Amino acid sequence: MMRSFVDEKENLSLWASTYHAGEYLDPVAVAEAKAKKKAKKLAGVSAPSLTKGDIFEGSTIEQSSLEGGPSTVELISPKQMAVEGFKAQSEMVIESLDRLITAWEERKESVVVEGVHLSLNFVMGLMTKHPSIIPS
């Protein structure tokens, strides 16, 4: 449904098969985001910045962190990139779905929503924000 609102050239990952969406993500950005999230979770500090020249599939990268100390960032496997592609598509769906649910609630209309991108965590978040949602 979302594809009818977005040109393929604007968002390749949205137009990709769910199984191939990860191929359209920037592996550097994904590795950096995962490293930052892990670093914040473990130590509460930011992770190192990466550049495209730093990434080689199946390797790790050692570079200086923003604080000046050395750090290692693990690259993400193709299998994990497929999972990250699915997550990216799911986030796009949930963001749009949130806006649609708000509009349906304002008009006091009912709707049934189904789809592979509706993970339990996303649906629970929508249920918290929209108490009128009744899971089936």
Image (spheres, helix red, strand yellow):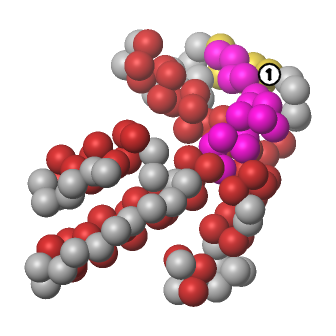
Taking depth in this image into account, of 13 and 38 the one nearest to the observer is: 13
Q: Is residue 86 left or right of residue 122?
A: right
What amino acid is labelled 1 in the image?
Thr
Taking depth in this image into account, of 53 and 123 the one nearest to the observer is: 123
State yes or no: residue 42 in magenta.
no
Q: Residue at image x 77%, y 24%?
A: 61
Quarter of the image for residue 20 reads bottom right
Is any part of residue 55 visible from this angle? Answer: no
Badge 1 element: strand
**Badge 1: few (under 14), some or many (20 or more) residues near its Cα, within 10 Å?**
some
Q: Residue at image x 65%, y 14%?
A: 70
Q: Is residue 115 above or below residue 44?
A: below
State yes or no: residue 81 in magenta.
yes
Is any part of residue 37 visible from this angle? Answer: yes
Q: Is residue 134 left or right of residue 63?
A: left
Taking depth in this image into account, of 90 and 37 the one nearest to the observer is: 90
Q: Residue at image x 63%, y 68%?
A: 14
Magenta residue span: 71-85
Q: Is residue 60 above or below residue 104?
A: above
Quarter of the image for residue 82 reads top right
Q: Is residue 132 above or below residue 123?
A: below
- Horizontal and vertical percent position of residue 112: 34, 68
- Horizontal and vertical percent position of residue 6: 57, 83
**Residue that carries the numbered disc 1 in the rendered image:** 60
- Horizontal and vertical percent position of residue 40: 42, 23
Taking depth in this image into account, of 102 and 74 the one nearest to the observer is: 102
